Image (cartoon, rainbow, N blue to C red):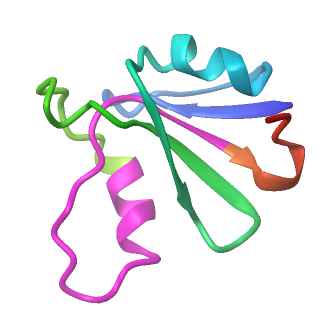
Amino acid sequence: MNVHIIRVDGSEEHVIARFGQIDRLIHADGLDTVNLRDGRVMVVDDLGHPNGKPVNRKATALYHGICRPGTTHQIVGDVAIVVDAEVDR
């Protein structure tokens, strides 16, 4: 599947990978997903906050775009964006 990676430094890359490889691609200890409500899913490091990973400003902006106004939670660490229908769970 096509994977769009957004790094904490703002850089972006596109790779072809299986869902089971995403943890290595974004250096995650555990995965969680955020439904972006447009057919895409943002895969995030579930342990990014407790592990002190830096804020990912681009990913946070995407997240805030689907949240209720006033949401303050931030996305940390590198993230992967995938098309939900392509996920090979």
Q: Is residue 18 left or right of residue 38?
A: right
Residue at point 54%, 10% (across, down): 24
Residue at point 56%, 49% (across, down): 42
Residue 36 or residue 46, whichever sits in front = 46
Q: Quadrant of the C terminus?
A: top right
Image-quadrant location for residue 47: top left
User: At which x and y percent is residue 21?
Assistant: 67, 15
Please give the range of residues in magenta. Answer: 59-81
Q: Most prominent secondary structure in the magenta stretch?
A: loop
User: At which x and y percent is residue 6?
Assistant: 49, 34
Q: Is residue 67 magenta?
A: yes
Establish if 75 lies above or below 28.
below
Residue at point 38%, 79% (across, down): 67
Image-quadrant location for residue 72: bottom left
Residue at point 56%, 15% (across, down): 25
Q: Quadrant of the N terminus?
A: top right
Establish if 58 lies above or below 13.
below
